[in-house]
Image (spheres, rainbow, N blue to C red):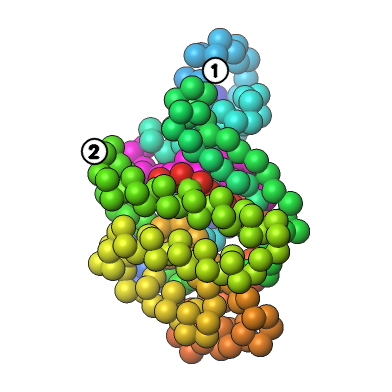
Amino acid sequence: MVVFVPHSQHDGGFYTSLEVFRTRLGGEGYSGGVRLLKATCKRFLDACEQAQISLPQKNFTLSYETYIPRQAGLSGFPVHERPNLVLSIEEELGITAGLQDRVVQVYGGIVFMDFDQEHMQAHGCGRYESLDPALLPRLWLVHVAEPSDSGAVHSDVRRRWQRGDPDVADAMAAFADIAQAGRRALETGDRAGLAQLMDRNFDTRRQLFGDEVLGKVNLHMIACARSVGAAAKFTGSGGAIVAFCPDGREQEEKLRAACEVEGFVFEEVRIGPQHFCAANHLE
């Protein structure tokens, strides 16, 4: 017997009002996390059969919990293989997602990723290296209370990449260069350089996607950060940004005040599985 346990919040059938119900559907859709549990079991079984791993016939119950805000980004398999397995679970459900998010979920902490195409083709994965969390300066997470789905943003770029769109190829090369330079800035303590690279990352993304795709709210969060001289970039494909104040505490307080005026959630970044640097990434 296999039992899937719905989450009280993300799969819950109880809402305080129809308005709350409608808001939840607008931000998270009709499907909760149980479908991911089911897809996980299916892909796990597929992977075990492919690897000729025999599974015991035992009962089990599967449930889930998360402390990561929405959109803020398997032992038994080698660690470098797990991100691809996790990604395949979402693909099983038709969810468009990026490999780099799965890498950082598996490795945790701060991870430098290099998705060199030759290495990917030869090994089926990128080069992943954990970095010392002490290298990070103080960072701030700015996000909206009810983020929208990022699937539409992902899917268009992926299709363009698969078609060999030269603009996408150039942008991916630029992102890779930014990540390499960002790592050097972290290791040398170059705060000004890191801030410039964060801004360059977002500017490259903006040029690639266009303002209509990025969305007014996401652009407004970036503008809010930049209004006080802070550097800012998306944490993923929208719904949240990460900001860096190279000038220190006074600038951080200005950013906090600006976010309060705009109604944005403002909190210090914690070292956890959502933080990473990525080279050659395809988001």
3 relative to 276, above or below: above
Q: Do residues under tags 2 and 1 come within 8 Å of each other at their CB atoms?
A: no
Judging depth in this view, the residue of 46 and 121 nearest the camera is 121
Please state the extent of the stretch shown in magenta in the rendering. Answer: 93-109
The quarter of the rendered structure image containing the N terminus is top right
> What is the x, y in percent for residue 192?
61, 71
How many numbered circles does the render carry?
Answer: 2
Q: Quadrant of residue 130?
A: top right
> Which residue corresponds to the image point at 70% horizontal and 56% vertical from the top-left?
187
Q: Secondary structure at mark 2?
A: loop
On the image, numbered disc 1 is attached to which residue? 48
Q: Give the mark nearest the N terminus, 2 or 1.
A: 1
Q: Is residue 113 visible?
A: yes
Camera sees residue 155: no
Please determine whether, in this image, residue 182 is positioned above or below residue 249: above
**Mark 2, mark 1: which one is toward the viewer?**
2
The residue drawn where x is 41% and y is 58% is 237
Taking the magenta stretch, the answer to whether it contains residue 91 is no
Q: Which mark is residue 163?
A: 2
Q: Amino acid at mark 1?
A: Cys
Amino acid at the residue labelled 2: Arg
Residue 263 place in picture, x, y as percent: 47, 83
- Residue 178 marker: none
Relative to 24, say whether 177 is above or below. Answer: above
Is label 1 in a helix, a strand or a loop? helix
Confirm whether the magenta stretch covers residue 101: yes
